[in-house]
Amino acid sequence: MQCQFLILGAGIVGSAVAYELSRRGQSDIHVLDVDLEGELSSTERNAGGVRHLWQHPVNVELARHTIALFKRYKEEVGFREQGYLWLQKKDYAESGNALLERARRNRTEYHRLEVDEIRRRYPFLDKTEDLAFGIFGPRDGLINSNAAKVFFRKEAKAKGVRFHDFKWAQALKIESGRVQVLVESLGDRPTAQQRLKAPQTPGGTAESWISDKVVVALGAWAQQVTPLTELREVLEPVRRQISFFEAENFSFGNFGMVVDSSRVYFHPEGGKLLSGFVIPHEKPGYNFNYDSSFFEDHIWPALYERSTYFERLKQISGWAGMYNYTPDKSGVLGDVPGLPNVFEAHSFTGRGVMQSYGAALALGELILDGGFSTLDASVLHRNRLKAPNNWLVETLHI
Ligand SMILES: Cc1cc2nc3c(=O)[nH]c(=O)nc-3n(C[C@H](O)[C@H](O)[C@H](O)COP(=O)(O)OP(=O)(O)OC[C@H]3O[C@@H](n4cnc5c(N)ncnc54)[C@H](O)[C@@H]3O)c2cc1C
């Protein structure tokens, strides 16, 4: 098989890259995924929050471009501009003020909400004695990430992009100036999912795909493809969990994401509630098990402390998905050293949905124009990971 562009991975990032390359008039674009349905992909398992509040300008800009596109196609992608509210404890008021100052410098719209105002807008937040104030981002919101992925794919397909299912990318190398990708056909969904759960399983027979340019958009699995395996030293796949539940006698208004001072976050979802929390020091590895005690150990106690409405909660379900962590918790985007015409965009930790289109826009410019123009994403190149001085440390993870 030969083509001009080959994208490995059809999650929201790979699909956005296909959208962008085809939008810019390119043809002969193919996208491979081991499971196009994406049941174990992070795009399927996230919380759907999108926001502009980040420390580093490049992360803000990637989010800004993505959210602008989501707003433009809000019906298609299910974007709800319902804001993000960050609750700041009295003991941490100083860091809250620093955050507001950072937001102002990054030219993003965030306001300080006094506790009275929080209680007026969010009447169910009725245990506020420990709070100093809130930080509110009116331009942030919630997205249906699956709908956004489908939107990117649909637009790309309409322009001739082809998506191929059950294809496992094993290895990349350069052959006579073109990129050769060894691809194994896995045949069905159960086998594909087994491989995603145990990606270091030795591969079987592979066919060769030759392409002028290749984009690696494999999310938490990028470091499993040879020779990107060298990234295993710096990248870590880590499980993150989400609970889905209902609150008795509680009717929801149209509020967006609330990030409690405990770092438990929650938002309404189809008349119920969705909530997550990053367990510190979670063991790295491809683990998709949802702990039966997660809700009772982490979610409920924090919400109980915040609202009398959350004293009686009933868990409905929960799930787990993967973050890919870099040491500084910013994503990896750029060319791949030693592999001419191979590019990468992955490891966006907990913000790959809100950065998906921005990443595709930037990568599109790098691939087609030879450099960035709309937004300079050069600082996200993997080389920075070798020198802690160049890290783009983000601490606002939830
Ligand atoms: C619990 C949780 C909550 C989150 N909340 C948010 C949030 O609120 N907002 C936000 O912006 N982000 C959030 N994220 C992060 C976000 O979901 C991810 O950063 C984003 O989905 C990554 O997209 P991707 O396309 O890079 O990866 P994925 O969606 O994981 O796609 C990668 C694709 O590659 C395929 N693949 C893997 N290996 C191979 C191979 N060798 N060959 C072929 N195909 C392969 C997989 O099947 C998959 O479809 C959250 C993540 C989790 C887990």
Image (spheres, grey):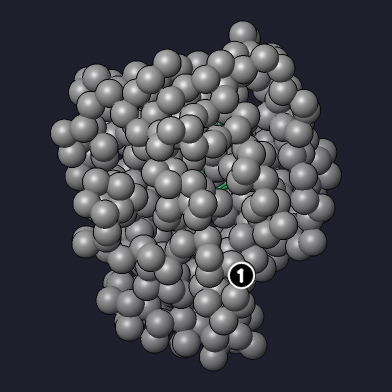
Q: Residue at x 39, y 29 (%)?
A: 211
Q: Amino acid at mark 1?
A: Lys
Task: Determine the residue positioned at 24% across, 19% down.
Answer: 160
Judging depth in this view, the residue of 124 and 238 nearest the camera is 238
Residue that lies at the very extreme toward the left in this rendered image = 25
Would you place residue 140 above or below residue 206 in this image?
below
Q: Using the image, determine if residue 203 lies above or below residue 388.
A: above
* Image quadrant in which you'd find residue 212: top left
Is 369 positioned to the left or the right of 260 in the image?
left
Q: Residue furthest bottom?
A: 94
Is 91 or 312 nearer to us in this picture? 91
User: Quadrant for ligand 1?
Assistant: top right
Please provide percent x and percent y for residue 18: 33, 33
The residue where tag 1 is placed is 386
The percent coordinates of residue 5 (x first, y second) are 34, 31
Q: Give percent across and percent down for residue 369.
A: 22, 51
Position of the N terminus by quadrant: top left
Whether 219 is drawn above or below 102: the answer is above
- Front-most of residues 107 and 197: 197
Residue drawn at x 39%, y 44% is 341
Asked if one can make out residue 325 in the rendered structure from this viewpoint, the answer is yes
Q: Nearer the viewer, residue 272 or 80?
A: 80
Image coordinates for residue 230, horizontal then vertical, percent: 67, 51
